[in-house]
Image (cartoon, grey):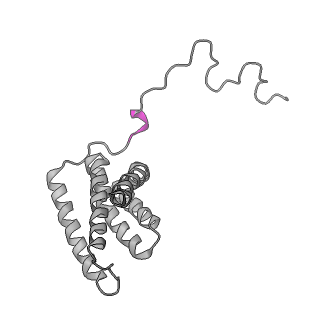
Amino acid sequence: MILFLAISLVPGVAEELFFRGVVQRSLVARIGAPAGIGLSSLIFGAFHLEPAQAIGAAIVGVPLGFLVWRTGSLIPAMLAHAVNNALALGLLRAGVPEVHAASEGPLLLLLAVVVMVGAGYALLRTTRPPTNTSVEVDQLPPAPPPPAGAPPTGAPPSGAPPSGAPP
């Protein structure tokens, strides 16, 4: 049970919090949803270091990123990530050998792409697109007024020489 939590649940939550909750949301706000999701998925893949695992992680990162963007919540991606990790752990514990990219890799990659496209299509059909994917500056609430007696913004603190005056 501890192995299950350490390999499936904890990374599923922690990695989604960082890669989708911080990295992807920042990128989507700056460069838009498609590019932000794609770039955050590549960064997610690179984080996994081992080339075969990095490629798979980058590929899995795209639907996870889309899931977060489309639903506006990290929870579904955390669950999907944890299930993916749990399935991989279950297959290893059941004695299924690791995939070697040269032999089984292309066929399994094709299967994974078909499954992801099907899941993506189902997600598109069952959810609505987000209404607001970024926060514009004019949408932010106004700053609170300074406390009574405080110098105006940009003014030197009391007792400081005016700007341009010798110290």
Residue appearing at x 42%, y 32% in the figure: 140
Residue appearing at x 31%, y 53% in the figure: 78
Q: Is residue 145 left or right of residue 92?
A: right
User: Magenta residues?
Assistant: 135-139
What is the x, y in percent for residue 53? 39, 72
Q: Observer-nearest residue: 128 or 2?
A: 2
In the picture as drawn, the residue positioned furthest to the bottom comes out as 103
Against 118, residue 11 (above or below) is above
**Which quadrant does the N terminus fall into?**
bottom left
In the picture as drawn, the residue positioned furthest to the front comes out as 1
In the picture as drawn, the residue positioned furthest to the right comes out as 166
What is the x, y in percent for residue 93? 29, 71
Against 153, residue 62 (above or below) is below
Residue appearing at x 18%, y 55% in the figure: 124
Q: Is residue 32 left or right of residue 152?
A: left
**Which quadrant does the C terminus fall into?**
top right
Examine the residues drawn in magenta and state their main secondary structure. Answer: helix
What is the x, y in percent for residue 52? 39, 76
Q: Observer-nearest residue: 161 or 71?
A: 71
Q: Is residue 131 left or right of residue 154?
A: left
What is the x, y in percent for residue 31? 41, 54
Q: Observer-nearest residue: 163 or 18?
A: 18
Please tell me whether residue 118 belongs to the stretch shown in magenta. Answer: no
In the picture as drawn, the residue positioned furthest to the top comes out as 148
Residue appearing at x 17%, y 61% in the figure: 121
Quarter of the image for residue 67 reads: bottom left
Quarter of the image for residue 119 reads: bottom left
How many marks can you see? Answer: 0
Against 38, residue 129 (above or below) is above
